[in-house]
Amino acid sequence: MARHTITLIPGDGVGPEVSEAARRAIDATGVDIEWEVHNAGLDVMEEYGQPMPDHVLESIRRNKVAIKGPLTTPVGKGIRSVNVSLRRELDLFALVRPCKWYPGVRSKYSDVDLIIVRENTEDLYAGIEFQEGQPDTHRLIDVIGELGDRRQIRKDSGISIKPISIGATRRVFEFAFRWARANGRRKVTAVHKANIMKHTDGLWLHVAEMVAKENGDVEFEDRIVDNMAMQLVQKPELYDVMVMPNLYGDILSDLCAGLVGGLGLAPGANMGDDIAVFEATHGSAPKYTGQNKTNPMAMMFSGMMMLRHIGEGEAADRLERALAEVIAEGRDVTYDMKADRDDPTAVGTSQVADAVVARLGR
């Protein structure tokens, strides 16, 4: 059996708890993994002066595969998202977020099995922003006016710039079609707002259509993003793999997670040409830090995706079956998966790991 060296970033907030639970479950599959553990996030700012130290990035580049717990991004504090910076620094251009329903999950929906592929490097998350009131912002407003835009931007505006390029769009759609084909998926849907943003989302749609013509064995269609949101609520069974720019992908992946039980069950994989970083979709939930309360299954399902990526498909299948059994039984699950969130029989993060590991050991 081959040994795999994998970078593990525990994260902050509830990250260390769910990461440890996921590591226990992954190790219980019997796959030979040497873990390189490195800390990142707000907890290392004082020591390293940045939330994602260089040696952590070097570890990921060396090992090509990493799994990370959630990392906190303060709201309105001027600190860029560590997750966004990580994706940009390593050129992890495609974020794959599966949303799959498992029997036993309490939801208004069943048999949902959707994949969101989110372009990770451009759109409004590219971080090209100009702060309100600054000289550069005023100069930009003046330049835009001089270029002939008759709709004068207010001087007290902050500005974000939304870049969407041919190159980045083409590669994420090429990735999505490859992924669909490799995983037996039937259809790719391009999500956009090209009816309004004709030179950004319009470009996105045009490139998607060109790539679709090169991949005629996979069905293709497009949807305007607001209609897509309604369609997902009304008839999610009509969709399969959906590809969308960064912001829409962030929003609609949470919507899809809600269809299948919530963020506690939503995994993710950030994919580049030769590097992959796996993570739960949910945030760091600092108010629950150290309480042994958070659902670790999103991290465990991310570990399942990681095992498939490194060629350990049989182990990934066993981990998925173990998780499905725990969910179906409904006993050893956290409060968010109970019919009553105050149910005293709800277990903690580590107890979920105990139950999954026990099933893997049978």
Image (cartoon, rainbow, N blue to C red):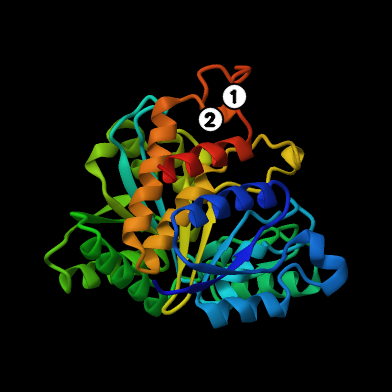
299 relative to 169 in the view: left or right = right
Q: Are marks 2 and 1 in contact (CB under 8 Å)?
A: yes
- Residue occupying the point 50% across, 44% down: 357
230 relative to 136 in the view: left or right = left
Q: Which residue lies most toward the front here?
A: 362
Looking at marks 2 and 1 on the same chain, the residue that comes earlier in the sequence is marked by 2
In this rendered view, identify the residue nearer to me: 119 or 145.
119
- Residue occupying the point 17% across, 74% down: 214
Type of the residue with mark 2: Val
306 relative to 9 in the view: left or right = left
Q: Residue 311: horizontal and vertical position, in percent?
A: 35, 68
Quarter that holds the C terminus: top left
Give the crowd class for mark 1: few <14, some 14-19, many >=20 residues within 10 Å: many
Q: Residue 201: horizontal and vertical position, in percent?
A: 39, 63
Q: Which residue lies most toward the left here?
A: 217
Q: Label 2 to label 1, Cα distance in Å? A: 6 Å
Label 1, secondary structure: give it.
loop
Label 2, secondary structure: give it.
loop
Above or below, comparing residue 56 to residue 341 in the picture: below
Mark linked to residue 146: none
Which picture quadrant has residue 104?
A: top left
Type of the residue with mark 1: Ala
Tally of numbered tags: 2
Mark linked to residue 346: 1
The answer to whether residue 118 is seen in the rendering is: no
Which residue in the structure is indicated by mark 2?
Answer: 333
